[in-house]
Amino acid sequence: NSFCTLLGMPREIITLQVGQCGNQIGSEFWRQLCAEHGIQHNGILADHAQGGSDRKDVFFYQADDDHYIPRSLLLDLEPRVIHGIQRGSMSRLFNPENVFIHSEGGGAGNNWAAGYEMGDEVQETIFEMIEREAENSDSLEGFVLTHSIAGGTGSGMGSYLLEHINDRFPKKLIQTYSVFPNNSGGRNGDAGDVVVQPYNSLLTMKYLTKYADCVVVLDNTALNRIVVDTLHIDKPTVEQMNGLVSTVMAASTTTLRYPSYMNNDMMGMLASLVPTPRCHFVCTGYTPMSLDRGAVSSTIQKTSVHDVMRRLLMPNNMMVSASLKQGCYISVLNVIQGDVDPGQVHRSLERIRERPPPFIPWGPASIQVILSKKSPYVDTRHRVSGLCLANHTSIGSLFQRTIKQFDKIFERGAFLDPYRQFGMFKEDLEEFKDARDVVDGLVREYKECEQPGYVESL
C-alpha cells in the first residue's frame, strides 16, 4: 500500500449509500464528482475533459466501453429514493448490479432494530456486492458510508454494515458522512422529526464509536441555522440542503482526486485529524457559500487566502450545533482550493498565530493547511475557497444532548415495544444500556482531552 502511495497510484474507495438520506446525499455527491471530473451523467467523459491530470479511478472505474461507473452501492429497505435516482438524469451512471432494494420494500419504519435485523437477513447478498467491488480494485484503501443516524435503515442497517465490514476488511479504513438529526424544531426545543430519534441516534453512535475510523458529523440543526441566519433562506428545500452537504463531501475528497504533494490518500488525511482512535468525530466549515439551486455559491466578494482562513475559524461557520467557544481544538485541517501562492498561506498563518484559537495542551497547536487544485471543468465565481475539517472537544456536547434526550424517553419506558419485536431486544434492553455507556464514555473522553495529562492516561 505504501508502495502504491509512493508511485502516486490511486487508492480506491468504495461508497455505500444506505437508506433514504444516505442515497439522497450520495446521489448529490456523485452529481458533484461528475461535474468536477468532466464526466457526463451517462458516464461518458466529455470531450473537453480528455487527458486531465485528475484521479478518476479513486471513486470511479471504467467499463469495457470506457464509460465511467461509480464505485458505489445503493442500498435501501424501501424503493422510493433509489427508484427516483434510477428514473432521474443519472439513471445510466450507476451499475445496476450494485443496487439493493429489499424485496418486501416496506422499509425499517424508523426503527434501528428493524434496520439492523433486516441487514442481517440480507447480508449475504450485500457482502457479495461489496466483495465484487473490492476485487475490482487494485489497491482498495477503504469505504465511505453515507447515512442518517436517526431513522431506521441508515442507522440500523448502517450499523450492521459498519460492524461487519470492520470484521471482514480489518485493514481497510471506514469513513462515514453521518447526518445528525435536527433538534431545534420540537417541543422544548429538544425533539426532532421522529419521536424515537434519540433511541436510533444513540444506538448508531455506539457503532460509529466502535467501528468507524473517522465520522464527518453533518449536523442538520447547524445546517438549518446556517441556511436561515447566514444565507437568509427561510425554508430551504431538501435538494438545497443536500447540495450544501455534497459540496462539503466533494471538497473533503479533493486531495484524493486532484493530488498535491501531501494527503493524497485517506490515511494521510485521517492521520492528521485523528491523533487518538476514539476521538474521531469531525465537524466541517466551508467558505464562501450560499445556496443556489442546490449548488453552493456565494455573495461574498473578497476571497483572499487570509479572508478564507479567517472565516473557516469563525464558530458560526461551523456546521455543528455545539459551541466552539467552549473547549479546544484537537486538530484543524484546512483544504484551500484555487490559485494560491503558498507564501500567502504562510503569512495568513502568522497572522492567525497572533491570536490563536485554543488547542489541546498535549499536542501541536498548529493549523494544518493543504493546497488543492480546483477542477478545471467547473466554473466558480471565486478565486479561492476553503473547507475546514476540525476535531474539537466541544462536539461532546452534541453527544451529551443525545444522551439527555434518550434518558427522557427511556426512563419513562416510552416507545420501546417496536424494538422488543426484534432479535437483540426480545430478551432484555441491555443493548440500549450498553450504547448509553459507550456514548457516555465518548463524552468523558472528549472532556479528558482538554487536560494536560490526557496522553499519560491512555
Image: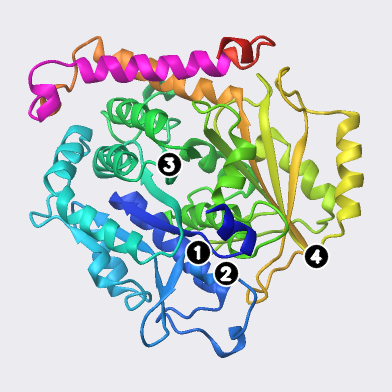
Amino acid carrying mark 3 in the image: Ser
Pointer 2: what residue? 55
Q: Please determine whether, in this image, residue 372 is positioned above or below residue 19.
A: below
For disc 1, the neighbor class at 10 Å (few under 14, some 14 to 19, many from 20) is many
Q: Please determine whether, in this image, residue 106 is positioned above or below residue 180.
A: below
For disc 3, the neighbor class at 10 Å (few under 14, some 14 to 19, many from 20) is many
Please name the residue shown 87% across and 59% down the image.
Answer: 341
Marks 3 and 4 close (CB-CB < 8 Å) = no
Percent across and percent down for residue 200 are: 28, 30
Pointer 1: what residue? 58
Mark-to-mark CA distance, 3 and 1: 21 Å
Pointer 4: what residue? 339
Residue extent of the magenta highlight: 420-447
Mark-to-mark CA distance, 2 and 3: 25 Å
Pointer 3: what residue? 178
Q: Identify the image quadrant of residue 304.
A: bottom right
Percent across and percent down for residue 86 are: 28, 71
Amino acid carrying mark 1 in the image: Val
Does the magenta run of residues contain 427? yes
Label 4 or label 1, whichever lies nearer to me, is 1
Mark-to-mark CA distance, 3 and 4: 31 Å
Mark-to-mark CA distance, 2 and 1: 6 Å
413 sits left or right of 218 in the view: left
Secondary structure beneath dot 4 equals loop
Secondary structure beneath dot 3 equals strand
Which labelled disc corresponds to residue 136?
none
Q: Earlier in the sequence, mark 3 or mark 4?
A: 3
